[in-house]
Image (cartoon, rainbow, N blue to C red):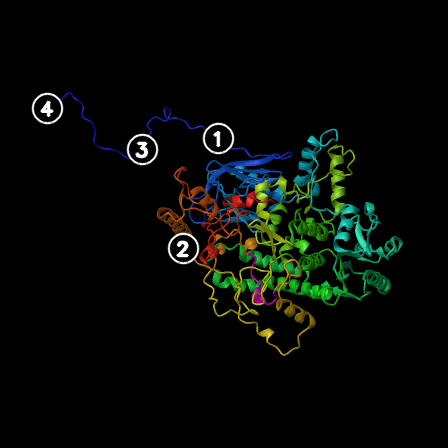
Amino acid sequence: MFSGKQTKPTFKSYLPPLQTDLKKSPQLPIKKLEAKLLPGEIVVNEANFVRKCIGADSGQDDLWGKLVCTNFKVSFISHNSLPQQRFQCTHRLLGEHDIPLACVEQVVTVNDVKGKQKILGSNQKLKFNPTELILYCKDFRIIRFRFDEAGPESAKKVCLAIAHYSHPADPQLLFGFEYVGKRYHGSAGERVNGVDPGGGLQTPLFDCSSDWDREIKRTGASEWRVCTINQGYFISPSLPEFFVVPVSLADQDLKQYACCFYSQRIPLWCWNHPSGSALVRMSNISDPQQQRKVEQRISSAITKSHPLRSDVFKSDLDKNLPNIQDIQAALLKLRQICVIESFEESEEKWLSSLESSRWMEYVRTFLRHAVEVVYMLESRHVSVILLEKEDRDLSCVISSLVQLMCDPHCRSLHGFQALIQKEWVMAGHRFLDRCNHLKKSDKEELWNQYPAAFEFTEVYLTVLGDSMWVPVFSTFLFNCPRQRAEHSRDFASSKSIHLGQDQALRFPPVWDWSQQFSLKDQTLFNNPLYVGKIATCLQNGTVKTFTHRRSKKNYSSTVRGLPSLMRNGSLGPNDTLTRRNSLVLRLRSDLSQVREQPETPSERFVRDFFSRAVDLQGLLLPQLLPSHLSVWKLYFLRWVPEAQIPHGGPVTAFHKLSVLTDEIEMLQNQLRQYKGAAGTANTSHAEHSKMYFKATSTPQQCPAPPEYLSSSFPFSPVGNLCRPGILGTPLSKFLNGAKIWLSTETLANETI
């Protein structure tokens, strides 16, 4: 009945066999999760089996790993990290899931079971075991961690450590001091490996008289000189040691007048117009009895510095601009509507919420006032004094905007860095207080005020905003140069660091980008549409020069997202209405503009500017109607993928459209090769010279998920997106007829 030959089984199981003996199953090597530490960085506390929330609804996209708090950052290390994107920018000091402690604004702990929630401050106690940690960041991120599988005590300790170290009580507890002491100074006072922080830097720091001399020569301010009376900060504690004053003002007079100004902040020269008009900033005079005498003496000296001996126009910023408290309130409201969870569902109320925050109104007010100052310098040829009570906030904004509009050098990479260094860092803007780096007892400080000043310098300011929260650089750490020098000396003395010839620890400046990015990644700072004074091209063996002019039919728009046919705030005949989720502010015609009031000289100046062809290396003015302003999506909404979709629409449809468009492009290439139109085309070259993304892999590569980029590329890595959504590549240029997009490899091969 049964044959002796064993029959071959015909049933095939597609399920893995059950593991009956776990001891005999092969054990995969477990990689030990350790945080990468910088010099001077130590691990304070850590928790294992922590889940980082990537998707809000389901946990299928979440990551498991270890949460580590150091004296520098909050680091999350995971085995199953997100796939590395081909065009992802890599930071040399921070990992993909790292958050600098200086970037943490608020630490919130939650217990789902007990229904409790608490905002943790420095040196506070936590009476319940947290099941969730929420980090609200100063760059508008919201990072969530779950402790469902972590030990309750380790979860509590790591939360308390993050709250404590994110807001230290003393500036010397900021990580930058430990880093610089270990990185650049040896025990005997010698420089480690001969490293000079900021060596070979092209951006002037304006901490020596030679930098100011070069700026005077660049702007042609022949009737101005470098003043050295504040060396050692003898006159004013918040002014730099070197600054520029009129030639006709003697040092003895400046010393005599200094006590009449708030904080002894005597007038500072900012910039000179080619006509000879000067831009000067000055604090208010605190002594009423000496006010008229001192004002006349200062105005007379500025008048003598003008070749035409023109009068001086005084602009009172405290009267004409919103105060710091109003700006803070508007920014807090804007922050609340920019971190909403369900962006699509609440979009109908989003624009009204944006309007009620008054943020765009304040941005427009700053731009309009800057244009009025430009009118006085450019058309009236008079010098302008910017008056502010303490000359440390509003003056920084207006003086920077004026120079950006008037001076093309300030719109270049090194020129813009020099502008920030001169008008903000060395002029004594309170970065330590305004950025909320330290623990505050009973009041909040305004942080991140800079979007109001530079609303139209997108990509570079986004990187600069990230670097503000990396405390290894001293540029945005202190309230003034004197504070930086004093704390550096005190820290070196307490740690027995021999400084040698240096008077204080030398922090690396933020402008040394090689410490954060490779040369290839630094090319992403370059604006591909930027045109210098002369653009040359070699064509048919001859050098041709192209000048970029604009016809009268085109209207300048220094802010983004507006159609070219927009005229005076109204839509053109070919413009379509905005679809759902679009953040372009399409307002009705501003009825306030339709009035019988006569046109002011500054309004006529702006109208004449837009009626003629504009030299890109000359004056640049913004449109000032409310409908011309749009939200800075790249900054405020960089962590909301849905907001990056051109002209609105659901993110899933945009994802499908991206894949479909790329597949059509590849099919067209194959069809051209089949017909012989392209000959033996090089497929690898086509990949590099067409779109940024691909739908499938090449035959030589293993199948991999396609690479998608948002318009916030490369400064919003996937690992920091803590909300569901798919990153898609903007297709507006391609769908409008563009045939070739430069790839990142092509851009990286260009000279910096």
107 above or below 644? above
Callout 1 environment at 10 Å: few (<14), some (14 to 19), or many (20+)? few
The circle on residue 1 is 4
Q: Which secondary structure class fits the magenta region best? A: loop
Question: Horizontal and vertical percent for residue 596?
Answer: 63, 79
Q: Is residue 234 left or right of residue 557?
A: right
**What residue sits 78% from the left and 38% below the top?**
503
Magenta range is 623-632
Looking at the rendered structure, the secondary structure element under dot 2 is helix
Q: Which residue is mark 3?
A: 16
Looking at the rendered structure, the secondary structure element under dot 3 is loop
Q: Nearer the viewer, residue 160 or 138?
A: 138
Q: Which residue is mark 1?
A: 31
Q: Which residue is mark 2?
A: 653
Earlier sequence position, callout 4 versus callout 3? 4
Q: Residue reaching furthest left?
A: 1
